[in-house]
Image: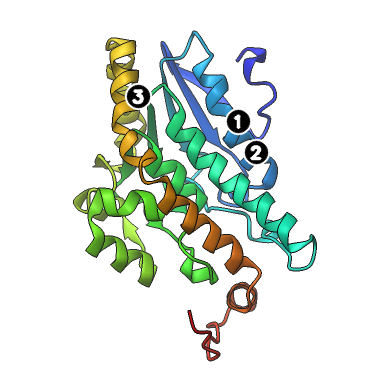
């Protein structure tokens, strides 16, 4: 690759086909969990791709057996580390920039969901213009499981894709679904056998790259207005998520995960 992407050292890039850039999430040994540095690079990379004359389509995938396990648990906000206003502003701005920058990107994105996609990783997967999943991939929002509201992309995307009833069912229960189930629920465009995922993602990317680029980008822009016009919903979900991170439920959920036991949510806080 050229120096164009040298600053994005926590991501990997290659060109599997003419005018197609493949961005691979890479955090070996941690299921490609998103560290703060990787998160910042994922916020900024879309503008660099839009400015790249050699790229018309981007494929996003994960290294190894996982797509992305979401935010790295050992990098979750620590209560008291910063002033509460600073912590909220930092985390809220980071989360909203990632989602907004993907929505604002001009060039089409294909996601090749090769394995587990959770939290922020699922946001990357489902905000792609053409999400393609391996039938055996595992999709899980994951927010309620760690004691926080379903922020990131979920409140803005899921009701539009799969309807309110399914969105509430999966986001509130935090039940996972396979790639095959995600296709049936309209969360992804296609579900294919795992061994066909790479070839299928390249095939779709090449089809998009061969189409009239201005028409494709304008069509994407118009369709993404469905998301932009609901940004107030997204802002509220992200704000609730950040507030929850400083609460007792998130602390208990994360402690329970570390200790490999069920969380104890016996204290009920009225909302």
- For label 2, the crowd category at 10 Å Cα-Cα, with few meaning under 14, some 14 to 19 and many 20 or more, is some
**Label for residue 44?**
1
In the picture provided, is 173 more to the left or to the right than 143? left
What residue is shown with label 3? 202
Query: Can the viewer see residue 202 in this picture?
Result: yes
Residue 267 location, quadrant: bottom right
Residue found farthest to the left: 184
Q: Residue furthest bottom?
A: 266
**Occupied quadrant, residue 44:** top right
Q: x and y percent of residue 102 in the render? A: 47, 34
The residue that label 2 is drawn on is 40
Separation of marks 1 and 2 at Cα, in angstroms: 6 Å
Looking at the image, is mark 2 or mark 3 nearer the viewer? 2
Q: Secondary structure at mark 2?
A: helix
Work out which quarter of the rendered image holds the N terminus and state it.
top right
On the image, the x and y values in percent for residue 90 come to: 68, 50
**Alpha carbons under labels 2 and 3: distance apart:** 26 Å
Residue drawn at (74%, 55%) of the image: 86
SS class of the residue under badge 3?
A: helix
Q: Secondary structure at mark 1?
A: helix
Residue 103 coordinates in the image, percent (x, y): 43, 34
Query: Are the residues flagged by discs 1 and 2 in contact, CB closer than 8 Å?
Result: yes
Residue drawn 62% across and 50% down?
29
Residue nearest the observer in this picture, 85 or 72: 85
């Amino acid at each position: 690759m050229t120096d164009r992407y040298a600053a994005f050292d926590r991501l990997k890039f290659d060109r599997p086909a003419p005018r197609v850039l493949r961005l691979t999430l890479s955090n070996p040994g941690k299921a490609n969990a998103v560290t703060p540095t990787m998160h910042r690079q994922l916020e900024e990379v879309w503008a660099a791709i839009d400015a790249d004359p050699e790229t018309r389509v981007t494929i996003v995938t994960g290294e190894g057996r996982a797509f992305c396990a979401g935010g790295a648990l050992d990098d979750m906000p620590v209560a008291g580390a910063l002033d509460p206003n600073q912590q909220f502003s930092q985390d809220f701005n980071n989360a909203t920039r990632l989602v907004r920058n993907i929505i604002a990107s001009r060039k089409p994105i294909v996601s090749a969901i090769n394995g587990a996609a959770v939290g922020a990783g699922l946001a990357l997967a489902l905000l792609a213009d053409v999400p393609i999943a391996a039938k055996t991939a595992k999709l899980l929002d994951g927010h309620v499981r760690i004691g926080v509201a379903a922020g990131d992309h979920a409140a803005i995307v899921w009701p539009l894709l799969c309807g309110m009833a399914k969105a509430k069912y999966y986001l509130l229960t935090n039940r996972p679904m396979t790639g095959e189930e995600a296709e049936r629920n309209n969360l992804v465009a296609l579900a294919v056998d795992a061994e066909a995922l790479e070839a299928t993602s390249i095939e779709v990317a090449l089809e998009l790259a061969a189409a009239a680029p201005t028409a494709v980008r304008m069509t994407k822009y118009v369709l993404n207005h469905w998301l932009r016009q609901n940004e107030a919903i997204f802002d509220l979900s992200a704000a609730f998520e950040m507030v929850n991170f400083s609460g007792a439920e998130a602390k208990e959920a994360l402690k329970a995960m570390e200790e490999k036991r069920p969380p104890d949510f016996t204290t009920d806080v009225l909302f």
